[in-house]
Amino acid sequence: MNKKIMDWPTFAGALFLLLSVTIPLILFPQKGQVIVDKLQDIITTNFGVVFMIVGLGIFLFLLYVAFSKNGQVKLGDKGEKPEFKTFSWAAMLFCAGIGSSILYWGTIEWAYYYQAPPFAVEGGTKEAIQWASVYGIFHWGPIAWAIYTLPALPIAYFYYVRKKPVLKISEACRPVIGKRADGPLGTIIDVLFMFGLMGGAGTTLALGTPMIAEGISSLTGIEVTLGLKTGILIVCTVIFAISAYSGLKKGIKVLSDVNLWLSLFLLAFVFIFGPTKFISETTFNSLGLLADNFFRMATWTESFAGLNSIAETSFPESWTVFYWAWWLVYAPFVGLFIARISRGRTIKQMVLGTMLYGTLGSVLFFGVIGNYGMYMQLTGQFDIINVLNTQGAPAAIISVIAQLPMAPIMITTFTVLAIIFLATTFDSSSYILASVVQNYVEEEPLRWNRLFWAFALCLLPLTLMILGGLGTLQTASIVGGTPLLFIMVMLAWSFMKASNEDIVASDDYQPKTINLDSKQIKRRLKRKKRLQKEQEQEDSQVS
Ligand code: NM2
């Protein structure tokens, strides 16, 4: 093995962080649980509002970028057509950013909101129903997709405009941190990004695995145990490992395609054989509610709770903050992917497309499957909430699917879909983790390296499943997401700095369209003038 290929400090740093979290938690689960709960409490109560400000800030920033001069920049050469047609671009984008969790939350999120709604609304009431149908879409909507898109800005810019491929997040911060990208600061950024991704994937895998176990249990009668769940986790890793190791590059592509079609089949089936009218009307209604209450939801911090005997629900902390953190930890990784597929589009098209199509995809899942479940509940046909409260979310999710016609086939479809989703999460996450710990990547990261991270990825979800509890799973993303708050700001800054510099230096630059206050831009302008003068002098001498 070539030593220079591996970036050992980053490798060791990430592995060390992973082990120093998982080993003590496995050895001392009870004490660990106390610490985990405390940590979540400290971060969400103190920094919760920061997550919310950053979330909304990113959304507004992207809108600004899209409609500014920077948004007109083409990712590629002049006149180049987009590499992918818009439909396949949107489908790829959605599949890259979404995994088994949309099956999980798309089916059951409403039931949590229905019982414990936001805005001091009483649970189980008419008003609660409205919020139950819209809040899921909000948490998987425009702000969420904006978070995903931000890292794609600098990465795509370097890739297609400056023609410098970027695989590391530290590299994407170079315009801001300069040479320090090669030193300890760069390593810290990459390690924190890896740690975040492992936390996010930990939440995904620890949620998805029990759901699959429940699906298998309902089909076969096998009891759901920790052993079964561990087995599932390992089987998913092995499915991925076989396809990666046998060099079947197409393997994963086939899995993703199968997933796309199975998802569409599931959605179409529920839409047609479920309450079609109710689903359409409620989804449409939710879109209006979302538009109407967007900023209210994005800024609701429950600041009066605890005062004047106003009850505290912790809704913003346990949902919105958790979600923004969860999207944040995945963002650089999905951003890399969005950048890769966006060749030939303008920044504006990339930004608006991601927010629009991403949200639309989420609306489909939440609107169809979520509203189907809610319909069963509200019409009294099936008491999902009872199953949720007595047997837990995974059982409740499978029980919703079990209400469909041809239940065994649909449960199988749902479970297979979740298994493939999980395998592709292993695939794509391990690909990125492995790339970050290499100094350069020839076509693909080293195989042993990818396999190593795929198996390392099992560790955290395993720990989380041993500890149990939704709060614990959420903490993995929240803790992992905190450093990302800073990294995201740097990525935004990096993009603005690099693209502004290029715009100013370009031939068709017209000064008025740019903020002339920036010292750096003034310096650049001076230099440009000087160069022009020199050129003119040279020309006159020649003639
Ligand atoms: N997000 C979209 O588990 C998954 O589906 C992957 C989860 C961040 C909530 C991403």
Image (cartoon, rainbow, N blue to C red):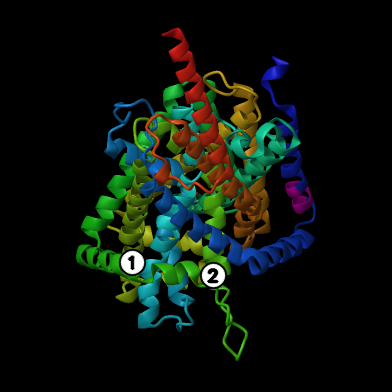
Does residue 25 belong to the magenta stretch? yes
* Relative depth, front residue between 471 and 441: 441
Magenta: main secondary structure: helix
Quadrant assignment, res 76: top left
Residue located 77% across and 46% down the image:
20
Task: State the extent of the magenta-drawn residues as a range.
Answer: 21-26
Q: Secondary structure at mark 1?
A: helix
Q: Amino acid at mark 1?
A: Ala
Looking at the rendered image, the quarter that the N terminus falls into is: top right
Could you tell me how many numbered marks the image carries?
2
Label 2 residue near ligand 1, CB within 8 Å: no
Q: Which residue is mark 2?
A: 316
Q: Are marks 1 and 2 in contact (CB under 8 Å)?
A: no
* Residue at 45% across, 84% down: 122
Instruction: State whether label 1 is within 8 Å of ligand 1.
Output: no
Distance of label 1 from label 2 (alpha carbons): 19 Å
User: Could you say which is closer to the camera, residue 492 or residue 307?
Assistant: 492
Residue 499 counted in the magenta span: no
Q: Which residue is mark 1?
A: 291
Where's residue 348, x and y in %? 36, 43
Can you see residue 218?
A: no
Query: What is the x, y in percent for residue 24?
Result: 79, 51
Question: In terms of depth relative to the viewer, which is nearer, 339 or 100?
Answer: 339
> On screen, 156 above or below 512?
above
Compare residues 193 and 125 and report the one nearer the observer.
193
Q: Position of residue 51 (x, y in %)?
A: 58, 60
- Position of 54 with respect to 42 (left or right) is left
